[in-house]
Amino acid sequence: MASDRVTFRRARRPEHKQQRHDAILAAARSQGLRKGVRNVSLADIASEVGVHKSALLRYFETREEIYLHLMAEGWQEWVEGMRGELEQLPVGSVDEVAGVIARTLADRPLLCDLMMHTPLTLERNVSIESVRAYKLATLASLAEGTALLCRVLPGLTEADVVDLMVVVTGVAAALWQAAHPPPALVALYAEDPQLAHGQVEFTPSLQRVVEVTLRGLLSRLSGPSGPPAQGEEPGVVDELPG
Amino acid sequence: MASDRVTFRRARRPEHKQQRHDAILAAARSQGLRKGVRNVSLADIASEVGVHKSALLRYFETREEIYLHLMAEGWQEWVEGMRGELEQLPVGSVDEVAGVIARTLADRPLLCDLMMHTPLTLERNVSIESVRAYKLATLASLAEGTALLCRVLPGLTEADVVDLMVVVTGVAAALWQAAHPPPALVALYAEDPQLAHGQVEFTPSLQRVVEVTLRGLLSRLSGPSGPPAQGEEPGVVDELPG
């Protein structure tokens, strides 16, 4: 009987639904890590789960919703990953904070890959409810991250951390793609010394940029116009409060 | 006769070939500006030029090569656009340099849109020769931009300008996508005050980040560990050379 086959295929009990849901996310995660998010289709995910594409669409609207879900999860897991290290740092450890941010991102390649896909495609091919859930989840992660960072660097305001995250996510997204070039670009770098420096090293580049950003944000404490630039009179540097 | 038809359709004289080449780039430019690069297919470009897709492939390898060409052109035209303004600035004008970078990019929406597509797709779907030509062209533009920036801010090294450009391109790419959200996201921002601040303003956000980056890069002149951070003894600030 046709309805029996449908019953057989569908997960009807809540714990089975949750298992199926988790299996879809796990398949999208492993496919994304193996092939790069750009190359993973809904059919690839379905095939790894061992179901038909249409079965996936009972759990998620689109391929993009699956990855947007993993992006929200990635943000939360990243902030949790930074927590232990940031909580150990003495107040004022600028370089060490930059190191923690760069290393914890380097350890999360799927998150770095998703950072470029989120504004470009993931937020565009989902319902308003999915994008709302995603935005609320990342705001919560951002608030937790802000508290962790402001404890180590109390000179940072909440607005500073938003600017810092704009830099971190924009630069990590671009560096991750540049650090994982396609074969043609690898061959070009190998044969052309003039272009070899195009081969980016993700962690040191990101760490340097984050450190520069933190110094720039904190330098505003030295006075309204920051440290003296060349050709200007050195400004009066106020004593910082203890 | 079949061969007559082919002769009729092909541009055989060099000036006609150049006209056809330029018409393809102009069509890709106007389609990209109108619909966003993500939504433009090779067929769209062919239709605007008024030829069949296969005719385009005598001039460019792929849709991606057309846009990679426009990206190289965009870099060069952007540096030329900054030249007049940067050459007027007195030495040490940090905030003004940030303003010039942000405004000249805001005036070039196609370049900002292409910044995210370049590492993600454009460099991946072209031959090694096309990507080499692109990289050499952008290196030349970068060298010109470096000379312009180091005249105004002589404290910047060439390596500093590379880091600055990593920030500028990564952040401009991300902010441009965020500043041009799809209708569902616009509706979400309108109905949910908690999320309304997700609506990014491109120029002020980019200007702030560039200013912070420049201050961070220049603050390293103040000493090997930069300006004093909270909880540390204020360091000795060396006199800057005139």
Image (cartoon, coloured by chain):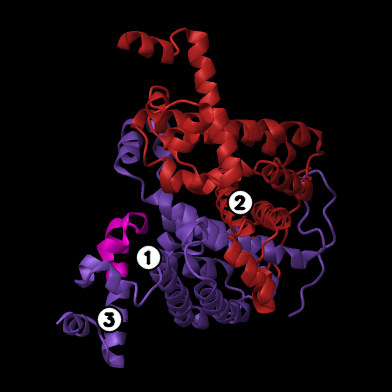
Chain colours: A red, B purple
Q: Where does residue B19 sit, x and y in percent of width and height? A: 27, 84
Subunit under mark 3? B
Q: Where does residue B211 sit, x and y in percent of width and height? A: 57, 61
Q: B46 or B199, which is in the foreground?
A: B46
Q: Where does residue B49 sit, x and y in percent of width and height? A: 22, 72
Q: Is residue B208 above or below residue A138?
A: below
Q: Is residue A15 above or below residue B230?
A: above
Q: Are marks 3 and 1 in contact (CB under 8 Å)?
A: no
The residue that label 3 is drawn on is: B20
Task: Give the quarter of the image for residue B215.
Answer: bottom right
Using the rendered image of the protein, determine whether residue B35 is visible from the camera's viewpoint. yes
The residue under label 3 is which amino acid type?
Answer: Arg
Answer whether residue A220 is magenta in the image.
no
Disc sitting over residue A172 in the figure: 2
Q: Residue at x 25, y 85 (%)?
A: B11
Residue situated furthest front in the rendering: B1
Q: Is residue A211 above or below residue A134?
A: below
Magenta segment: B26-45
Q: Residue at x 54, y 17 (%)?
A: A19
| Pointer 3 and pointer 1 on the same chain | yes
Q: Residues within 10 Å of mark 3 (few under 14, many from 20)?
A: some
Q: Is residue B12 left or right of residue B208?
A: left
Q: Residues within 10 Å of mark 1 (few under 14, many from 20)?
A: some
Q: Which quarter of the rendering shows the C terminus of chain A?
A: top right
Q: Residue at x 67, y 65 (%)?
A: A199
Mark 3 and mark 1 lie on one chain; the one further toward the N terminus is 3
Answer whether residue B32 is magenta in the image.
yes
Q: CA distance from mark 3 to mark 1?
A: 15 Å
